[in-house]
Image (spheres, rainbow, N blue to C red):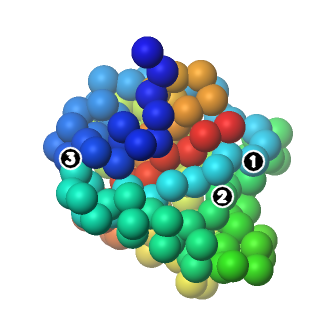
Amino acid sequence: MPYQVEQMLKMTSDQLDDLFVKSTAGDIPDGEGKGTALIAEGTVISPEIAKFINYFGWQRKTFNAKAGLLTNTITPFGIAAIVARVYKGPSLLDGKECIVLDYSETSLVAGWIRDEIRMIEPAFYLGEVFGGKTRLVHFVLQF
């Protein structure tokens, strides 16, 4: 059975970490991935927080696999901003290969953030957000 965002919103942080660890990096995506932030993982308020963030904050990531870059789309006005370099490398969570979304050289706002994603099924990626070496939250991308 394919994963659904609604199912991911019900999972705890530990369950999401376990799924991330069990998954492989997969191919670097190309094109637009609709994003959903997984905040307060596994709680009844997680879906409401996700809706709020999706409307007022972050909506999607648009990848250019060939260039090794992505752009985040943010705010209710759909502004394309916050660029990241994209490449494969070891995960901070488990040391295994993941797709790294590296903002350190491309963003003054998010330079301290590192996202990592792994494909949990075709066109569906689970992400980990790190501030420094501390895992902060999870997210999903649907292509």
Secondary element type, mark 1: strand
Counting from the top left corner in percent of width and height, residue 40 is at: 25, 63
Judged left or right of residue 49, residue 82 is right
Q: Are marks 3 and 1 in contact (CB under 8 Å)?
A: no
The kind of secondary structure element at disc 3 is loop
Q: Looking at the figure, which quarter contains the N terminus?
A: top left
What residue does disc 1 label? 32
The three-letter amino acid code for the residue at tag 1 is: Glu
**Which disc is residue 60 wearing?**
2
Mark 2 Cα shell of 10 Å, populated few (<14), some (14-19), many (≥20): many
Q: Disc 2 marks which amino acid?
A: Arg
Q: Residue at x 60, y 72 (%)?
A: 55
Residue 53 is situated, as x and y percent measured from the top left of the image, at: 50, 71
Name the quadrant containing residue 35. Answer: bottom right
Of callouts 3 and 1, which one flags the residue occurring earlier in the amino acid sequence? 3
- Residue 84 figure quarter: bottom right
